[in-house]
Amino acid sequence: MGAILAFSGKGGSGKSNLAALVLRQLIRAAVKPVLAVDADPNATLGLMLGVPVESTIADLRDRMGEAATKVSEIPKERLMDQWLAEILSEEKGFDLLTMGRPEGPKCYCYVNSLLRRYLKELRGSYAVVVVDCEAGMEYLSRLTVDDIDTLVLVAEATSVGLTSARRIAQLADALPVRVKRRVLAVNKVGQPGPAETALDDRQVPGAAAVVRVPFDEDLYRRCAGGEPLDDQAGEAARPAIESLTRLCLPQLCQDQPTHR
């Protein structure tokens, strides 16, 4: 059964960046196979990884609606499995599955249920599943991911950032969500701007460890310009990303070589 790493945080915290960078680190450490899951309706993980996303789980929902109105000799379950194989992007070192968003004022409930189903089906085929969760706390309330090996709480180096991370941790405690380990990633430390307030990392309950990821000018430039985070991205942040990856997957990473 593959280990699930879920990256969570408020919008703008950099959770998608860290998810992409940890995925790159897993590939460098020869951990395989890896599945990347973009569970945020505002899908950007594929863009950060340089993967063109042509079809999503939300598209399957619409196709299922059309299939329900037609007579077919192929069972609906087989159709869904066939379509899943079509939307799974196979890349060098990892596969990518994107949730997407329904067109127009449609409910996300069915799309979330499909994502839950696919994660359960696919998990056994991968060593690690890296999930870029929806910003905020909605994904936990909907139980999109309810069995997590490591929950990475991503927060900017501000009081507001830590407050958001603390609230997500408290919500996880209140829901039937199984979380084996929590790691707090304080992101973009030392970024240009007003002086940072002294922070107490203990504000986030249950965090097994804290990683402080420094502001990286290269990452900022790439994200601002829409450039992918390839294997050369974020050299300044690399040591912190290596540390974060080891904390997330101590059993898998302790004996794996790091390739530079």
Image (tube, grey):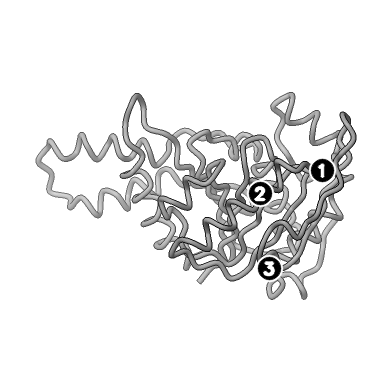
Amino acid beneath label 2? Ala
Residue at 47% x, 48% y: name it: 139
Q: Residues within 10 Å of mark 2 (few under 14, many from 20)?
A: many
Q: Nearer the viewer, mark 3 or mark 1?
A: 3
Secondary element at image label 1: loop
Per the image, the residue denoted by label 3 is 249
Q: Nearer the viewer, residue 58 or 260?
A: 58
Q: Earlier in the sequence, mark 1 or mark 2?
A: 2
User: Which label belongs to residue 129?
Assistant: none
Per the image, the residue denoted by label 2 is 19
Judge from the rendering whether residue 133 lies leftward or rightward of residue 28; answer left or right: left
Distance from label 3 to label 1 (Cα)? 22 Å
Residue at 78% x, 56% y: name it: 201
Amino acid beneath label 1? Gln
Residue at 65% x, 63% y: name it: 182
Q: Nearer the viewer, mark 1 or mark 2?
A: 2
Per the image, the residue denoted by label 1 is 232
Q: Nearer the viewer, residue 160 or 89?
A: 160
Q: Earlier in the sequence, mark 3 or mark 1?
A: 1
Q: Nearer the viewer, residue 133 or 159?
A: 159
